[in-house]
Image: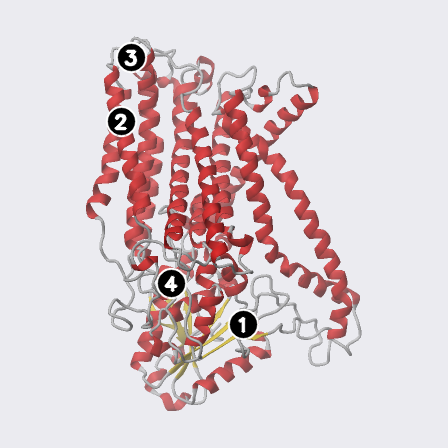
Amino acid sequence: MLGDPRTVRVTGDTTAAVYRRTEDADAEQDPERRRDEPVAEAYCWSGLTSGNASRALWLLLLPFMVVNLAHWMRPTATGRTRAVRLYGVLVRLIALSLTVLLTAAACEVALDLVAWQCAGTASCSERRSWLGFLSAHQGGWWAQPGRRLALAAVLPAALVGLLWYLSNRTWSAYESQRPLDGTGTATGIGGSGPDQGDAESHGPDAPGPETGGTGRRATPVRPALGRPGFWYGRRLVARLRAAHTAAGFLTVAAAVSGAAAHHDRTASSPVPEVFGSLLQGALLLCALVVVWVVCRRGRGERARDTRLDGALISYLPVAAAALLALAVLYAGLSRPDWRSAGSLPGEAAFQLLALGQGLLVVALALVAHGVYRRTPEPRTVLRGLGGPAVAMLACALGGVMTGGVAQRVADWLDGPGTPGMDRADMAGPPVLLSWQASVIPVLLLLLLVPVLVLVVRTTRTARRLGPRIEAEYTPEPPDPARTRRIARIRATAPLTDSAPWILGVVSAAGLLLGTGAVAGSWRSGEVPGRAFDGSGPFLESLAEAAQSTGSWLVGLGFLLFVAGGRRAYKDASARRTIGILWDVGTFWPRAAHPFAPPCYAERAVPDLASRMSAWTATNPGGRLVISGHSQGSVLAASAVWQLPDATRRRVALLTYGSPLERLYGRWFPAYFGPGPLRGLHRSVHRWRNLWRTTDPIGGPVRICADPDPGVDRGPLKDPLVYGRTTRLPLPEPILGHSDYQADPAFAEERAVLFEELGPLVPRQGEPPREREGPQRGSSGRSSG
């Protein structure tokens, strides 16, 4: 991007740094020599999004990342403090349910399928020699069901411990990085304009930011992304990590002790029943504390909160781990007459968990719709229901991943049989998982309708564009093949804008079908293939086909998911692709789920803001043009919002291929909606945005004002030349989302911005995108 292979790191480390050309390293020491040209810098954040091979394992945390996005998709709110707080509480509760679901799935595999069913069945334990010491038919010390469960609890407990470790390590590296002090307000970098009165001033979850002022030089109201504490979520992530870790340990403890307590109540047992009752009462009390911690406090952004809830963080997970240890000891007490049969008690737990997730998503939709009706913005996706739809998607992903593991492990352990059906040695996983798998083929069939609609619409649009494209490039002679290719790319680029209603269809269908699966499993207590026995040959065969197809689809999807992560672990190019995915998914702080992949912007935005503030402080006459492509434009805007007012007036903004309005403004209206973007335009010296109709990601920022502020320039012509010419004898590429610098409009607008900033030296262009180079390859141009 710097146009020179010889670069030097100006500031930063191997994770993220600012680079210059080698010849510009000491530009400030000799300003006269560069009076007529700017000094370019490039900010590279590749280490934050791709890094080493272990980052590929973050794919397994996808449901956590998705539900975290739902927190930030709240519609713009004005004067709805309680509704905003309730929205945040509901999202955090959905996130907590996903942690419980993941841990319960691990317990289902380790405790139920392996320790309870397979080790308790002679034929299954004989096929798996490594289970011999646990076999109930060999009569060893571990043969008692409670002791088998106690030993198997090590696996899910280790999983919870691993999630805690990963969250704690990334918390230390990301959320605990404090921005530069002394360049903005008393609390650090931040705009000096007034804060709007909102929920953030009193507690968690800020309502939507609005900007004030009618003139260009009016002092704007500081939006949420400009608050000093927005990119410093250390305290909240620590609280949520403590609560989710405790919830995981409590889930394992409940699974271990529940079966033993049930046995002590229903049979003549040498263990007093009161032991199990006291233990389960303690588990319930600790679970209530976990829910209270999750609901009590959200994000605090008014100032950078450097405090930590020491007692809570130290003692809540420790207390849950102590209860788990007591549960293991309780289950391990001798019960000579206890035998394991059928499946481990826990079917109702999965049903209640699925039902609870559905009710939370419905409640979230009601709150979001109420907030949207108060402050409607026409381009907000799904009329404010984008957050609930994404939360539903997260629950569906969690169900598919956990159900896929349980189904495949059960099939593997049972050999030739099908768990839950006739001629099977094992009862298999909870029947709800089979019902959920059975609705997947139905959901895929429903998706065929919108897919076919999009294909037909795109084809018809491409045909209509043909004559218009040839007229655009007149008087060059028409080339039908060239015209078709340009028309096809232009027609497919708007498919990004169809994502909201596709998501709406998937989420609504998933909610309805999931409700039907819970009802079917609750009423019948059988897998679908057996629940429809006696209902006629057609329905019987349809139910069996749906069950078997869905089971294999769930398993295949999970295996493909794991294979993709494994390939990314070994293949750097595949890891770069995942890095691009994280560019979008991990831009937002971890406000709902502490086990989600960490937010790279909590390092990148303060980096950029600190660099700009420090440079302007040491060069009083200097001016800045900060340019950003794609995700880099989002980082650029976020960093500019963090600057003091005086510094922002010395900054011009150049964005290209930018998703600021097309994606972020529509999906995250409270933070990138019309109000915040208008305020950003008023606060900087000048802003220009370049876009193309062939770009599936970038678009205009649509700042509507009277008179027209002239921010958007486009659509730019793409390709620049239609056919072969003497000057360009080879066909020019259709650039789409890449290589905006190749368009003459880029150099023109950049020169205009420097002219408007004034002839002060040194003038600096600081594009927040990754430097291209073999040793940096991760996000590349797509996130530059």
- State the image coordinates of residue 521 (x, y, percent, origin top left): 52, 25
Residue picked out by circle 2: 281
For the point 62% across and 68% down, the residue is 735
Q: What colour-coding does the image apply?
A: secondary structure
Residue type at mark 4 is: Ala
Closest to the observer: 137 or 66? 66
Check disc 3: other Cα within 10 Å, few if <14, some if 14-19, many if 20+.
some
Q: Are marks 2 and 1 in contact (CB under 8 Å)?
A: no
Which mark is in front, 2 or 1?
1
For the point 72% across and 73% down, the residue is 722
Q: CA distance from mark 3 to mark 1?
A: 74 Å
Q: CA distance from mark 4 to mark 2?
A: 42 Å
Label 1: state its secondary structure: loop
Residue type at mark 3 is: Arg
Label 4: state its secondary structure: helix
- When asked about the image quadrant of residue 49, the answer is bottom left
Residue type at mark 2 is: Gly
Q: Are marks 4 and 3 in contact (CB under 8 Å)?
A: no
Residue picked out by circle 3: 335
Check disc 2: other Cα within 10 Å, few if <14, some if 14-19, many if 20+.
few
Label 3: state its secondary structure: loop
Q: Are marks 3 and 1 in contact (CB under 8 Å)?
A: no
On screen, residue 687 above or below 567: below
- State the image coordinates of residue 710 (x, y, percent, origin top left): 54, 78
